Image (cartoon, helix red, strand yellow):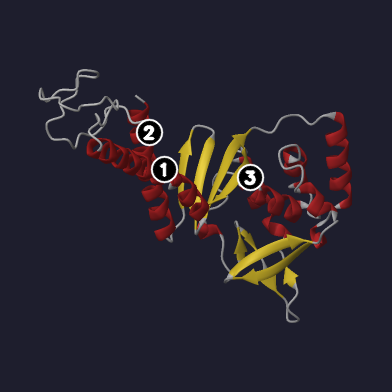
Amino acid sequence: MRCRLLTLAAAASTFLCLAFVLLCLIARPRELAFGRYTFRSGGNLLVITASVLPGPPNYGTGQTVQALMRRTNNREIHWDLVHSRLHPYAEYGTAADGLRLHPGWAVPALLSALDDPDRFVVAHVVLTGMGVPGATDPKLFNATTFNGLSVTRSADGAPQIDPSQLPAIRRAWHMRNLTHRQQIAWLSIPWIVATLALLPLAWLAATARQYQLAARRTRRGLCPTCCYNLTANTTGTCPECGISTVSRTITPKTPAI
């Protein structure tokens, strides 16, 4: 029974190893959803996220979010160009940076901030960073557009955002499903493959050991399965366990690991 379980586990582990190796070989990101959970592979990483509906904030969290919203403004968002795409960021310690620590709780306040010309860019950037479904369409991101928000450059290179985009941005967010994807874990695919490969290696080692024991017992005139002394036995069958001993190279039924 133990041998069968080990064999099945080793076969399943080998299949998973091959699947993860294929994920590494595929450069294009893949995403697979199972209910609330989403598995996304990109490069050598596997990211697991869960969909969480934002709930009403408790007193402490609500006070923190409201304080951050009063302090933040669009000037706290800076813009870089990374791999031909706009990349917004907020300096560490600013109110905009603090809002990222309360993504689920901050949703109602962020939606309200979409009505404020001085804060709608912050709200748009933080909501996009939450991983809301539909907000990661590659077509919405390029060198001049970040998730539908157009960013231009002045003569001195400073970023400029037209406030007239506010109604369109607000309408787009209110039409979306604001389910928050909370990252549960990220795993290195090569480490997953290495870990899963341990079980098939253990199975190979156990199998090789059992064949070695069986061959050693056969050379000593013993039953390869139960070690019963078969000296002068001419029946071709072990009287102890009933296994045929004609070939003298019998594979044991239940190997001891």
Q: Residue visible at 75% across and 74% down? A: 158
- Compare marks 1 and 2 and give the one earlier in the sequence: 2
Q: Which amino acid lies under the numbered mark 2 shown in the image of this protein? A: Leu
Q: Are marks 1 and 2 in contact (CB under 8 Å)?
A: yes
Left or right of 5? Residue 56 is right
Q: Which mark is residue 6?
A: 2
What is the residue that sits farthest to the bottom in this orientation?
155
- Helix, strand or loop at mark 1: helix
Determine the image quadrant of residue 112: top right
Question: How far apart, in angstroms, are the residues tagged by discs 3 and 1?
Answer: 52 Å
Label 1, label 2: how far apart the Cα atoms are: 9 Å
Query: Mark 2: few, some, or many residues within 10 Å (few <14, many ≥20)?
Result: some
**Residue 181 at x, y = what percent?**
61, 41
Q: Nearer the viewer, residue 237 or 121?
A: 237
Residue at horizontal 13%, vertical 35%? 247
In the picture of the structure, the residue carrying the numbered disc 3 is: 173
Is 124 on the left-hand or right-hand side of 74?
left
Disc 2 secondary structure class: helix
Residue sticking out furthest to the front? 232
- The residue to which callout 1 is attached is 202
Instruction: Choose between 135 and 247: the one closer to the eye.
Output: 247
Residue type beneath disc 3: Trp
Q: Nearer the viewer, mark 3 or mark 1?
A: 1
Residue 163 in the image: above or below residue 208: below
